[in-house]
Amino acid sequence: MNNKNILNKKTENLSSDKLDWNIIQAEMKNKFGTDIYESWLRKIQFVEELKNYILLSVSTRFIRDWVTSRYLDQILQIIKVYKKDINRIELRISEKTENDIGQISHLDANLLNKNENVSFIKDSYLKYNRIDPNKKFENFIIGSSNKLAFEASKKVSDNISYYNPLYIYGGVGMGKTHLLNAIGLSLKEKNKVMFISAERFMYQFVKSIKSNDMVKFKEYFRNTDILLIDDIQFMNGKEAMQEEFFHTFNVLLDKGSQVILSADRPPNKLSRIQERIKSRFAGGLVVDIQKPDYDLRHKIVKTKIDELNVFYSNQINISNEIQKFISSEIKTSIRELVGAINRIVSFSRIYNKIPNVSEAKVILKDLLNLSENKVTIDFIQSIVCKFFKISKNEMLSSRRSRYLVRPRQTAIYLTKILTSKSLPEIGREFSNRDHTTIIHSVKTIEKLKKDNTELSTNIDNLKNQILYNKENEI
């Protein structure tokens, strides 16, 4: 048996073992960030693993609907890395009562002022204001891509209102939340700090309206010295909430409180946000965090492995070759970089061996396939239509002629494996077809590929054309 077959066998074994929910939770925290994880994902309970799906539970209908609409497809992709046979997730509501919902009217004000400068509203606000003690300035790894944002954050921590507001923007997983957290940590001893995501701000705003408690909502968000809001772009389109935020923002600036915001884009690129709000954001200091260069990525890899060695009593031994490989190939975000290290370490501990570069390529195959980010559904449809010599209008039509069905199913299958689009999103791009049709198409092609060598070869060729613009390369 050659090395490739041995490696395939190992990865099959890894997928066939019972799913470790602790590992999945760690991956979710890496992918989505601490704030979203703590707010929505941490309390997801693993119930049961069945033949091709897993059953999870959450405490409330609201959380179930929120997780399903925003995160479920990505959670499934994380699970499939470790258990490729899983193709769906079912979320049910547990029997517990909704104790964490709607108790604002029963608050005891004394509970909110027990010498705690980091404020949260007990129970009803779900303790959203959790500043992570591990995310501090001392362990923020600095490079040329993030030095300006780091220095600005330090300056604000030393001299409140020096830059007001401070607006930090950058791509997913670049360290924005870490910096906001570090600012909160450094200021919480002498100031009243409020740290919240825009999603949670929106959630509390809606809940306060429904429970007729807007007075207390205003009081808690305006009576603070430091307001840190993460992922401000999620306020897009919510006019009533933007109105309230605008007035809260002005009140805080007028009284000399410090406001720090993070987003995935600069103020002028925010969509469906009021112009007056974007103008206020741009009136402070706007700094960006760029993609990390090789030196910073390598420094992060070495630091993370050193941290894991402390945790595992120096039992982690990842070769310099692998460290350099990860640093060279994982370029999109720091979060993906850390996720790659965790996968390599998990492989090392499961098989009690240090992986070589070939094995690392298999373990990290989805992270290394960065061409996926550039692939569009329209491009896939065009390539497939050209290959099968049909028009795009024919492919997207409702006609079920055999010469159209197979190309259509092939395009749907390639879209599913080469993009991160959800089933409903794919359905919309194929003339609003139902998601069950998309599932059927994917399963049909997967089944045919096993028995039809010609089809399998054609799909591999199409995949290479789409990803690398190379024909006849398998």
Image (cartoon, rainbow, N blue to C red):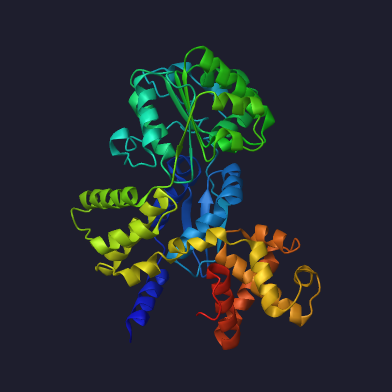
Nearest the camera: 72 or 226? 226
Nearest the camera: 269 or 67? 269
Residue 48 seen in the current view: no
Disc count in the image? 0
Query: At x 65% / y 23%, what residue is drawn?
Result: 212
Query: At x 61% / y 74%, what residue is drawn?
Result: 443
**Position of residue 403 measured from the top left corner of the image (x, y, whole percent):** 75, 81
In the image: residue 272, left or right of residue 350: right
In the image: residue 76, left or right of residue 345: right
Query: At x 53% / y 21%, what residue is drawn?
Result: 221
Nearest the camera: 180 or 275? 275
The picture quadrant where one finds residue 157 is top left
301 lies above or below 142: below
Query: At x 39% / y 70%, what residue is drawn?
Result: 362
Nearest the camera: 317 or 224? 317
In the image: residue 287, left or right of residue 273: left
198 lies above or below 254: below
**Position of residue 377 measured from the top left corner of the image (x, y, whole percent):** 65, 62
Q: Please state, as top left, top right, bottom left or bottom right, where the N terminus lies in the image.
A: bottom left
161 lies above or below 138: above
Residue 241 seen in the current view: yes
**Position of residue 247 measured from the top left corner of the image (x, y, whole percent):** 61, 19
Residue positioned most to the top: 255
In the image: residue 368, left or right of residue 274: left
21 lies above or below 184: below
The picture quadrant where one finds residue 90 is bottom right
**Position of residue 29 measured from the top left corner of the image (x, y, whole percent):** 42, 48
Residue positioned most to the left: 314
